[in-house]
Image (cartoon, rainbow, N blue to C red):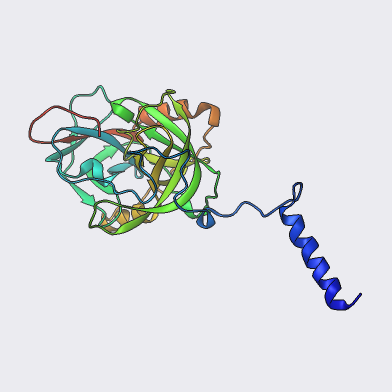
Amino acid sequence: MKLWRIVLVLIVIAVGQQFLPGGEGPRRPPVEDSPRNVPAQPSRPGEPRPGIVIQGGAKQTDATGTAFAVTTQGPLLTAAHVTDGCERVGVLANERARNPNVARGVLTHPVADAALIEVNHRGPPLPLGDDRALRRGDDGFSFGYPRARPGAVHGTLMARDTAKRDEGGGTFPVLVWADADRDPENDLPLSGLSGGPVLDRNGRLVGILVAGSERRGVFMSTTMAPVRDLLVQGNVTPDAGAVAEPIPINGFGRYGERLRDNLSVAFAVCRVARGPSRRG
């Protein structure tokens, strides 16, 4: 057999081993290589999807959200749409408290859905992580106050995509997570968990939760880039001594309880002029 025919046969065999059943196939790709706009389930009308426009602006009613600490005593991070359009922004120890620690102001990221609540808050800080190390299928956890009640969600990373805060705004990268489990277990919207931290399996911050589907399916978070931008702009130095603890998949709800109890995660409130309250 001529040499070129032998080479051709070897190439065909090598390619076939990659795709035939029983072949090892390619390794799991980094999430940067994953397909864009991949829903966790068949999409339904009205469901947020990658590339979503996150509405902020003026609010007609009071609203609530979640915020969290990255320094022992100082400002808290949250989502920009939690604080957009508020006459006053405050932080409470929990959903039952009545006297908020009122913020001096809010520093909002120019593009991403992220904000820094300028308030003196005492609570153990969350350690910073690196979302660039995440791969498709990795675990992520968010803790806070969905629907103004204590709660948590566990997700698995699906893809990276982009979002924008309003129709005319610029886009920013987001991580798209498949909703895997919740505490307490329910299929209700995650509204109110906006602004909560998203932590990796080792308990390190990898983003801020900014959106979730109307029906249970997916949720999205920022990357760490806007977090670091805000800390620089606000002259905030994250606590280098913040301790990271692995999050148990079967006990992530109790892990979240501890973060709320020690005030690493706080209840954020937005006050407008007048009107009934709603969950942000």
Q: At which x and y percent is residue 71?
A: 34, 45
Residue at 19% across, 34% down: 101
Residue at the extreme left: 273
Q: On the rendered structure, is 163 left or right of 240?
A: left
Q: At which x and y percent is residue 80?
A: 25, 46
Total marks in image = 0
Q: Nearer the viewer, residue 78 or 259?
A: 78
The vertical placement of 93 against 178, above or below, is: above
Q: Nearer the viewer, residue 216 or 46?
A: 46
Q: At which x and y percent is residue 87?
A: 11, 40
The vertical placement of 53 against 196, above or below, is: below
Work out which quarter of the rendered image holds the N terminus and state it.
bottom right
The vertical placement of 75 against 231, above or below, is: above
Q: On the rendered structure, is 182 left or right of 78?
A: right
Q: Nearer the viewer, residue 160 or 254?
A: 160
Work out which quarter of the rendered image holds the C terminus and state it.
top left
The answer, for residue 243, to whether it is visible in the render is: no
Residue at 19% across, 24% down: 98
The answer, for residue 92, to whether it is visible in the render is: yes
Q: At which x and y percent is residue 45?
A: 35, 38
Residue at 41% across, 30% down: 152
Residue at the extreme right: 1
The vertical placement of 265 against 208, above or below, is: above
